[in-house]
Image (cartoon, helix red, strand yellow):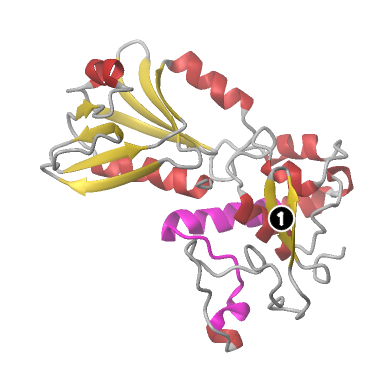
Amino acid sequence: MPEGHTIHRLARDYASRLTGAVAVSSPQGRFSDAAALLSGTELLRTDAHGKHLFLGFRDAEDTDWVHIHLGLFGKVSFGGAPAPPPADTVRLRLAGPTAHADLRGPTTCALIRGPEKQAIHARLGPDPLRADADPSAAYARVSRSRTTVAALLMDQKVVAGVGNVYRAEVLFRHGVDPYRPGRDIGPELWEAMWADLAALMREGVRTNRIDTVRPEHTPEAMGRPPRVDDHGGEVYVYRRADRPCHLCGDTVRTAGLAARNLFWCPTCQSG
C-alpha cells in the first residue's frame, strides 16, 4: 500500500498537470454518474491527509470532492495530451488540455461534499506532511497506550500516512524496540521521532522514493553494494530479514505485527 508521501506527491502532480477544464470519465463504469456531473469543470484544488487523496472541483457554496484511497492495488498514471483510448480497467480518467491522469484499482473513488470530507479528516490522526499537524495530539494517544509503539505508528487514527517502511525505519533510526509500549515513549523521544518522520517523508515527496539511511551509511560511504529491491531506496531494516545490520552486523529479524511484517535489529533496537 502506498505510504503518505506518495499521496501527497499525487496531490501535487494532479494540481500541476491538470489545469483548465477537464473531461472526466469512467471507462470502467463504476464512477460514471459522478464523472458526468464533473466533466467540463476545473480541478480547483487538491488535498491529502495520510493515505487519502482529495480532488476538489467546482466551487459554488460547497466543493465537490473526489475522495480516493488507493488501497493495496490502486495506481495513478499520468500522460500527455491528447489522451489515448483508455483501457476498460480505468476507474477515473481526467483529461485536460496538456495532460491526462488514469486511476486504476482503488479501494475508494467516491464523490463527496465538504462535510463528508471533514468527517474523514476528523477520524484520522495528524499527518507529518500537513501544515496543520499537531504531534501532541498523536502523543496524547501514544503515551497512554499499552499497545506496542510499532502498532501505534501504523494506526491511522494515531498517525496518518505512516506505513510499514517508515514505521520500521524511524524506530531503527531512534534505537526503539518495536515491542516497547506506547506509554513508555517519553515526550522528547516522541518529538524527535515525529520530526524525523516529517523530514523523511518530505524527502520522499521530493524524490518519489523512500531513503532512510544517513549520509554516513550510504553504499558509497560504507563501500557496500546498493540495495536491489522493487521498492527502491536505501533502508536499514525494511525487507532485510536474515541479513546483517549495516551498523552492528547482527541479523535483522522479522515477525508479524498488526497484520504486517515488522523488521528490526535486536541489537541496535534493544532500548
Residue 218 lies within the magenta run: yes
Residue 87 position (above or below residue 247): above
* In the rendered image, the vertical position of residue 153 relative to residue 120, given as above or below: below
Q: Quadrant of residue 168?
A: bottom right
Q: Single out the residue that lies furthest toward the bottom.
A: 223
| Residues in magenta, as a range | 192-219
The secondary structure that dominates the magenta segment is helix
Residue 221 place in picture, x, y as percent: 57, 85
Q: In what quadrant of the picture does the C terminus appear?
A: bottom right
Which residue is identified by label 1?
262
66 in relation to 189, above or below: above
Image spot of residue 5 (x, y percent): 50, 49
Query: 214 or 69: nearer the eye?
Result: 69
Q: Please tell me which residue is depicted at 52% across the width and 60% down the height of the picture.
A: 210
123 in magenta: no
Residue under the image location 61 percent in, 56 percent down? 165
Q: Position of residue 202 (x, y in %)?
A: 51, 54
